[in-house]
């Protein structure tokens, strides 16, 4: 099978590309490097020990995207490409709506025109909004609290519409919880531009002395230690979930959401202490005010993915911290 991986040079896409190549899939990566670097492609080749084709392409450019589908006989698409920073999406809502919505509309049109109707989409736990109580199940009401979240909400709805109109389409809506960690080779990992917004890459930079201390956003939440609780999932476990979702698309039709998490919550301080253990250092932190828009607790009910995809996360916080440390230690200046 030939799989188009949009956004395959990014954090989750690069790890998934390795898993796909390992499993014997042929892949074509399309990316515009708006949040990644060409070097990642070489790393994927090195880690997987296999070659693949790459198209430098902005998915918002329909003609360029059509050329990709004209050039390859694509059987299915895994669609990672998108902008993902919550804070930035509040400052640049139009850029987020344009990039995430137009790219996905172009993709679906191109797929339809080329008879390709299997899609795995990167959705997010952010679609559970602020009014549900964890553990989140896929049938809970959806909402969003920022433009980024609304793009995921709207794209999910759009894809449900596509599947309702054409019964041959098969779309897995994968709602990721908090992917962290890195490939065990130390060659691939998360490499955000500028000061990281997310907890784990921030801790990694504190550990290599690139940032002075972690700010813990609130210690007065209604959680066991007062800090926010999230469902952190090893990025390689998450990557493997995409292979199971592809299999699901080959055997089913319709649009179906699946939570991909571990089902366990960890607090900010638990992650910090886990990382301290992995790197053998005490990491400085101070408590700061709560971050606007944050909730106390988010974790998944993953029983649907286990039952219907045959997928379950296998790695724990210790693995996530070990592999994250191995990556940043080897790449203190990024990729
Ligand atoms: P990432 O930024 O590392 O990767 C996204 C890739 O898409 C980048 O390489 C970027 O250059 C590319 N891209 C963006 N817009 C494009 C366009 N118009 N045309 C072509 N390429 C484009 O992000 P990631 O962490 O790997 O996330 C992948 C997907 O998963 C995103 O859709 C994101 O919203 C979603 N997601 C991520 C998280 C997370 O915590 N990392 C959580 C939930 C959902
Ligand atoms: N946190 C800190 N200090 C930091 C960064 C984060 O204390 O410097 C805390 C947050 O307050 C939160 C926890 O660490 O309690 C996790 O925060 P992240 O920013 O790492 O992750 P979020 O759960 O806020 O959001 C992430 C993505 C969203 C996505 C969501 C669910 O940024 O896009 O996971 O997948 F929707």
Image (cartoon, rainbow, N blue to C red):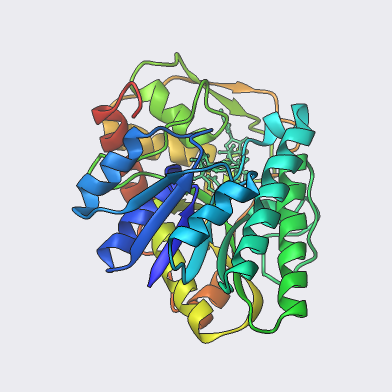
Evaluate whether residue 179 shows in this view: yes
Name the quarter where the N terminus is drawn: bottom left
Q: Name the spot of residue 187 as percent of width and height, x first.
A: 26, 39
Name the quarter where the C terminus is drawn: top left
In this orientation, which residue lies closer to the viewer: 6 or 203? 6
Q: Name the spot of residue 79 as percent of width and height, x first.
A: 55, 56
Q: Residue at x 68, y 41 (%)?
A: 99
| Left or right: 332 as drawn, with respect to 117 | left
As drawn, the residue found furthest toward the top would be 212
In this orientation, which residue lies closer to the viewer: 285 or 104? 104
Q: Quadrant of residue 203?
A: top left
Evaluate whether residue 234 shows in this view: no
Q: Residue at x 37, y 60 (%)?
A: 27
Q: Note whether 56 is above or below 118 in the view shown.
A: above
Q: Name the spot of residue 114 as percent of width and height, x first.
A: 57, 69
Q: Residue at x 27, y 68 (%)?
A: 24
Q: Name the spot of residue 304 as percent of width and height, x first.
A: 57, 77
| Left or right: 205 as drawn, with respect to 228 | left
Quarter of the rendered image showing ligand 2: top right
| Left or right: 145 as drawn, with respect to 87 | right
Q: How many marks?
A: 0
Q: Note whether 61 is above or below 238 in the view shown.
A: above
Q: Residue at x 63, y 77 (%)?
A: 169
In this orientation, which residue lies closer to the viewer: 91 or 56? 56
């Amino acid at each position: 099978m030939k799989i188009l991986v949009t956004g395959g040079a990014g954090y989750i896409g690069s790890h998934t590309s390795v898993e796909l190549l390992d499993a014997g899939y042929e892949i074509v990566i399309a990316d515009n490097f708006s949040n990644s670097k060409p070097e990642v492609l070489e790393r994927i080749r090195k880690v997987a020990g296999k070659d693949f084709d790459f198209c430098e392409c902005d998915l918002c450019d329909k003609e360029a995207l059509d050329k990709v589908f004209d050039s390859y006989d694509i059987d299915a698409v895994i669609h990672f490409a998108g902008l993902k920073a919550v804070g930035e999406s509040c400052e640049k809502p139009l850029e987020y709506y344009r990039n995430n919505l137009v790219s996905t509309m172009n993709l679906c049109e191109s797929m339809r025109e080329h008879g390709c109707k299997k899609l795995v989409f990167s959705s997010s736990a952010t679609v559970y909004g602020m009014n549900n109580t964890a553990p989140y199940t896929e049938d809970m009401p959806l909402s969003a609290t920022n433009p980024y979240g609304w793009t995921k909400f709207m794209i999910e709805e759009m894809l449900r519409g596509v599947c309702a109109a054409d019964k041959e389409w098969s779309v897995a809506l994968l709602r990721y919880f908090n992917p962290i960690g890195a490939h065990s080779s130390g060659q691939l990992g998360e490499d955000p531009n500028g000061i990281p917004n997310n907890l784990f890459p921030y801790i990694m930079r504190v550990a290599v002395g690139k940032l002075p201390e972690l700010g813990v956003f609130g210690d007065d939440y209604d959680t066991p230690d007062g800090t926010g609780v999230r469902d952190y999932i090893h990025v390689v476990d998450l990557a493997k979930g995409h292979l199971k979702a592809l299999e699901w698309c080959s055997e089913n039709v319709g649009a179906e959401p699946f939570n991909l998490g571990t089902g366990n919550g960890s607090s900010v301080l638990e992650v910090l202490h886990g990382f301290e253990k992995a790197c053998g250092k005490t990491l400085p932190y101070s408590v700061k005010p709560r971050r606007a828009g944050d909730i106390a607790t988010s974790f998944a009910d993953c029983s649907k993915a286990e039952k219907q995809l045959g997928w379950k996360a296998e790695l724990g916080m210790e693995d996530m911290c070990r592999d994250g440390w191995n990556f940043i230690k080897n790449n203190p200046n990024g990729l």
